[in-house]
């Protein structure tokens, strides 16, 4: 929690309220609590943009047009901006029904600083002015050049993400990997749904039935006779088959599938791995020893060579002191050369430049991380049948100026009818539904028809009422 000065502005910019209040992020919302007044709670989903119109001033614009300005936040300003960014990102991912866990990248788009989040099925770009979802089913080639990643998108301008720094290659590789995985999941899912379909036809169908893309029934039947009818028969609930048959008679029917849950399985087993082929090598990396024998004889010889004038005993040690063998400095060669005595002593101890070559350190493998079972995808979890399907089966029925959206494998209470002017109306509705995560209520509709006894008549009336 932080204390800040605040102003609440109307959509026209007029000041409605100002003062000092406590500010915090709690339970998916920005909470503004003025002393002695009611609390203002702003859910992340209601925040349209977060900007800084002036230094050290945070402006939060709401979806309805009102704005809240916060200033004098002190050191909490950076933390508040980070929490707002993360909260808005989570809210945008929930609104777009993004699948899987996100990998986040800081970047810059044409609108300014943004955060790019890569999910299993889509790229989500969240900037100050809002969020944008790019489904991998509609994405094409990914290119990285001059620290800019460019993603081709069908039916619109490419998406360009810049100022990625050292993470440019990482983002490009991740996007390319996710695009391959999406196509592989589609092929695996269709293979389990239609086990008798030959590989060539299966490959052609998987290329068309990308995640969230509706394909006309006549196009599917061109790949294999009655392919569309078989898909409807397998993936549709028994109580919904009459409705689909009626839509097939009244409209140009298209069929699609959309993944609802992640098939990615995290790594398990936190036991670090050990490379048994290379035995640990921890010895013989010290300075090599001298040439003296071990034990007392070697010790006496080393002491004799290392001692100054007088050997071990100064004035003598059993005939070795005084002016004897050690008296002249023991390898010092008399007065004037005593400095070399220490040098020759260290050489004798094995510390000279020409000593035995040291054994190099054996390189060891990295054993600090690794798992018993790596991360993978459980493609068997993708199913359009059963009580809890992980793949949504749906149909779009197009007729001049109208598109009907019907869910095949879930007991949805409503059929939605959308306006779709133009020759590409069905494809436009398909894209709008995909951008909304197939949350039908998020797309403006002409009507919602419950599945009751009047369903057939009401659908006929909506399709007959041309604009």
Image (cartoon, grey):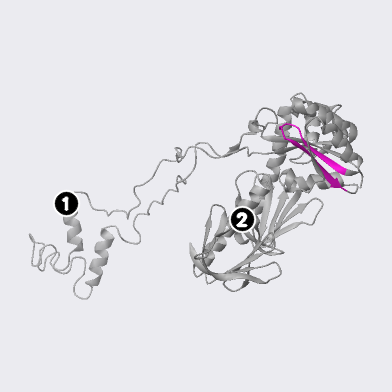
The residue lying at 34 percent from left, 49 percent from top is 284
340 up-or-down from 409: above or below:
below
Residue matched to label 1: 297
In front here: 457 or 205? 457
Res 111 quadrant in image = bottom right
Residue 57 in sight in this render: no
User: Relative to residue 434, is residue 67 depicted above or below?
Assistant: below
Question: Alpha-carbon neighbours of circle 1 within 10 Å: few (<14), some, or many (≥20)?
Answer: few
Image spot of residue 286 (x, y percent): 33, 53
Looking at the picture, does residue 329 appear above or below residue 181? below
Q: Is residue 404 magenta?
A: yes
Q: Residue 164 at x, y = what percent? A: 63, 60
* Foreground of the two, 76 or 362: 76
User: Residue 47, how many percent across, how many down?
Assistant: 64, 59
Q: In this view, does 460 lie to the left or right of 330?
A: right
**For numbered disc 2, what is the local secondary structure?**
helix
- 462 horizontally vs 412: left or right: right
Q: Is residue 153 visible?
A: yes
Q: Between residues 128 and 182, which one lies in front from this camera angle? A: 128
Badge 2 crowding class, 10 Å Cα cut-off, few under 14, some 14 to 19, many 20 or more, is: many
Magenta stretch encompasses residue 244:
no
The magenta span reads 402-420
Left or right of 76? Residue 418 is right
Examine the image and state in which quarter residue 311 appears: bottom left
Q: What residue lies at 57% left-to-right and 58% top-to-bottom?
A: 30
Along the viewing direction, whichever of 304 and 87 lies nearer the viewer? 87
- Name which of mark 2 and mark 1 comes first in the sequence: 2
Dot label at residue 44 = 2
């Amino acid at each position: 929690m932080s204390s800040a000065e605040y102003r609440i502005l109307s959509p026209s910019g007029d000041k409605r309220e100002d003062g000092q209040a406590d500010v915090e992020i709690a339970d998916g919302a920005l909470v503004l609590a003025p002393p002695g007044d009611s609390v203002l709670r702003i859910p992340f989903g209601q925040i349209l943009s977060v900007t800084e119109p002036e230094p050290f001033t945070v402006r939060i614009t709401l979806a309805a047009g009102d704005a809240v300005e916060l200033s004098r936040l002190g050191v909490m300003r950076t933390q508040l901006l980070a929490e707002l960014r993360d909260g808005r990102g989570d809210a945008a991912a929930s609104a777009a029904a993004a699948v899987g866990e996100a990998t986040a990248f800081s970047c810059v788009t044409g609108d300014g600083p943004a955060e790019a989040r890569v999910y299993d099925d889509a790229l989500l770009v969240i900037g100050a002015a809002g969020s944008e979802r790019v489904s991998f089913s509609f994405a094409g080639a990914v290119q990285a050049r001059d620290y800019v990643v460019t993603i081709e998108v069908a039916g619109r301008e490419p998406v360009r993400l810049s100022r990625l720094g050292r993470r440019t290659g990482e983002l490009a590789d991740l996007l390319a990997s996710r695009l391959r995985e999406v196509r592989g999941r589609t092929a695996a899912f269709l293979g389990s749904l239609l086990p008798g379909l030959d590989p060539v036809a299966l490959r052609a169908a998987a290329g068309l039935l990308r995640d969230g893309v509706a394909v006309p029934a006549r196009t599917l039947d061109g790949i294999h006779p009655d392919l569309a009818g078989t898909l409807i028969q397998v993936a549709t609930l028994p109580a919904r088959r009459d409705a689909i048959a009626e839509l097939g008679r009244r409209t140009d029917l298209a069929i699609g599938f959309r993944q609802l849950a992640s098939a990615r399985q995290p790594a398990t087993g936190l036991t670090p791995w050990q490379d048994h082929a290379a035995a640990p090598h921890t010895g013989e990396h010290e300075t090599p020893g001298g040439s003296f024998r071990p034990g007392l004889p070697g010790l006496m010889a080393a002491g004799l060579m290392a001692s100054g004038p007088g050997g071990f005993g100064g004035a003598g040690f059993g005939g070795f002191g005084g002016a004897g063998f050690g008296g002249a400095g023991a390898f010092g060669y008399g007065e004037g050369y005593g400095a070399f005595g220490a040098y020759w002593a260290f050489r004798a101890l094995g510390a000279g430049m020409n000593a035995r070559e040291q054994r190099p350190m054996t390189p060891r493998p990295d054993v600090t991380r690794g798992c018993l079972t790596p991360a993978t995808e459980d493609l068997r979890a993708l199913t359009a049948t059963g009580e809890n399907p992980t793949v949504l089966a749906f149909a779009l029925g197009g007729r001049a100026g109208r598109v009907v959206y019907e869910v095949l494998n879930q007991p949805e209470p409503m059929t939605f009818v959308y306006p779709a002017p133009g020759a590409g109306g069905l494809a436009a509705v398909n894209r709008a539904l995909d951008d909304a995560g197939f949350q039908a209520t998020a797309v403006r509709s002409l009507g919602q028809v419950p599945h009751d006894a009047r369903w057939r008549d009401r659908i006929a009336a909506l399709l007959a009422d041309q604009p």
